Image (spheres, rainbow, N blue to C red):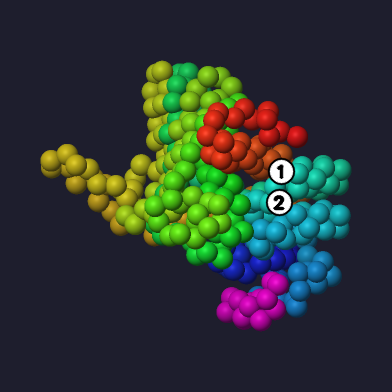
């Protein structure tokens, strides 16, 4: 099995290293808009490299991993499915709803399997929470509390093209909520603030955000996030039911300290970044992708799933801008 990878920035080079750990994959060839960077990463990891992303399609690849810049995702994904190449693509599929719908149409008509990079679906904690909900052990759900708190903000170049906090960061929480509960979000009420670097406001973004989601069964989901959580990378999902409750991310490395006398837990070293927290999940999702390339099963995270999470993010951005509740149907095409 020969896998092509386009984009060797932070997440792309991480994926390249992860792909090397999958026994089913025999060889990996990488490309990047920056030719020198592609060859440098290939040399460091012992991989092959080609001079441009387009050259990958002539390199005999069986599958393609897209980890390029956001604005290149849609065109690369369409080119891949038109070539009949099974593809893994980091989120977002496209920078906007219209582009995502267009890609979904192309993917659907091609019949080619595509997996989107929402790695929390492959994390053992999220999988356990999903099973607990499906089994009925928690009873009917009344509240979910989700959060993604980064230890340090990304730079201005990243923020300029990220699409905003809800589309870039909270979208992972939105997908996890849908996947764990099996429910759809019908309405959102969102807000945000800027208390850190000025460049967030300069690009129309926020560094801290919160949203209240209403699910189609009447449950509420509180979603919060920030770019400034210096205690460490904190990502959790609490699922509270009429019979019982469960929490994802409640381990000894949780970057939170108790104010209660004599309580020392959690006391472990916090995760420094998302790649440390989800290392096993990233391996599991790319192993699942290798299975897709080998024609085993179907995608566990489709373009249609990505579109639904994007709709929630889009509604949150509209709600934040207009300071009002927004129904998902308002942004749905």
User: Main structural element of the magenta stretch: helix, strand or loop?
Assistant: helix
Is residue 156 at least partly visible in the picture?
A: yes
Q: Position of residue 326 (x, y in %)?
A: 59, 30
Q: Secondary structure at mark 1?
A: helix
- Look at 86% across and 54% down and name the residue there: 82
Quarter where residue 139 is shown? top left
Closer to the camera in the image, 56 or 7: 7
User: What secondary structure is found at the residue carrying circle 2?
Assistant: loop
Give the magenta range. Answer: 32-45
Q: Is residue 216 magenta?
A: no
- Disc 2 crowd, CA 10 A, few/some/many (<14, 14-19, 20+): many
Q: Is residue 285 left or right of residue 198?
A: right
* Residue pointed to by mark 1: 97
Q: Quadrant of the C terminus?
A: top right
Q: Is 56 placed left or right of 180 in the picture?
A: right
Q: CA distance from mark 1 to mark 2?
A: 7 Å
Residue 236 image position (x, y, % from top left): 42, 42
Residue at 40%, 31% (x, y): give it: 246
**Residue placed farthest to the left in the image?**
261
Pinpoint residue 213: horizontal percent, then vertical percent.
52, 30
| In the depicted structure, whether residue 136 falls above or below residue 70 | above
Question: To which residue does mark 2 refer?
Answer: 94
Instruction: State how many labels appear.
Output: 2
Q: Is residue 41 magenta?
A: yes
Q: Residue at x 50, y 22 (%)?
A: 219
* Residue 26 in view of the camera: no
């Amino acid at each position: 099995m020969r896998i092509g990878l386009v984009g060797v920035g932070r997440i792309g080079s991480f994926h390249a290293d992860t792909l090397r750990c999958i026994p089913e994959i025999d060889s990996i060839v990488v490309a990047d808009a920056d030719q020198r960077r592609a060859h440098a990463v290939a040399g460091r990891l012992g991989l092959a490299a080609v001079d441009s992303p387009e050259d990958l399609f002539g390199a005999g690849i069986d599958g393609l991993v897209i980890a390029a810049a956001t604005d290149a995702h849609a065109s690369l994904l369409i080119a891949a499915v038109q070539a009949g190449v099974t593809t893994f693509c980091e989120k977002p599929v496209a920078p906007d709803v219209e582009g995502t719908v267009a890609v979904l149409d192309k993917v659907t008509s091609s019949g080619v399997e595509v997996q989107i990079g929402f790695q929390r679906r492959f994390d053992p904690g999220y999988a356990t929470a999903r099973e607990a909900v499906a089994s009925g052990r928690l009873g009917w759900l009344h509240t979910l509390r989700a959060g993604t708190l980064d230890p340090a903000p990304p730079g201005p170049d990243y923020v300029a093209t990220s699409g905003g906090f809800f589309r870039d960061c909270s979208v992972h929480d939105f997908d996890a909520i849908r996947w764990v509960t099996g429910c759809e979000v019908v309405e959102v009420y969102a807000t945000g603030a800027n208390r850190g670097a000025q460049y967030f406001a300069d690009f129309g973004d926020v560094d801290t955000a919160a949203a209240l989601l209403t699910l189609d069964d009447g449950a509420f989901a509180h979603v919060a996030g920030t770019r400034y959580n210096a205690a460490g990378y904190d990502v959790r999902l609490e699922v509270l039911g009429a019979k019982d409750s469960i929490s994802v991310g409640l381990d000894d490395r949780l970057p939170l300290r108790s104010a209660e006398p004599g309580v020392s837990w959690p006391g472990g070293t916090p995760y420094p970044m998302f790649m440390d927290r989800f290392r096993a999940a990233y391996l599991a999702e790319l192993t699942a992708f290798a299975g897709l390339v080998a024609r085993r099963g179907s995608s566990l995270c489709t373009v249609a799933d990505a579109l639904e999470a994007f709709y929630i993010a889009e509604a949150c951005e509209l709600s934040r801008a207009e300071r009002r509740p927004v129904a998902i149907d308002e942004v749905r095409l």
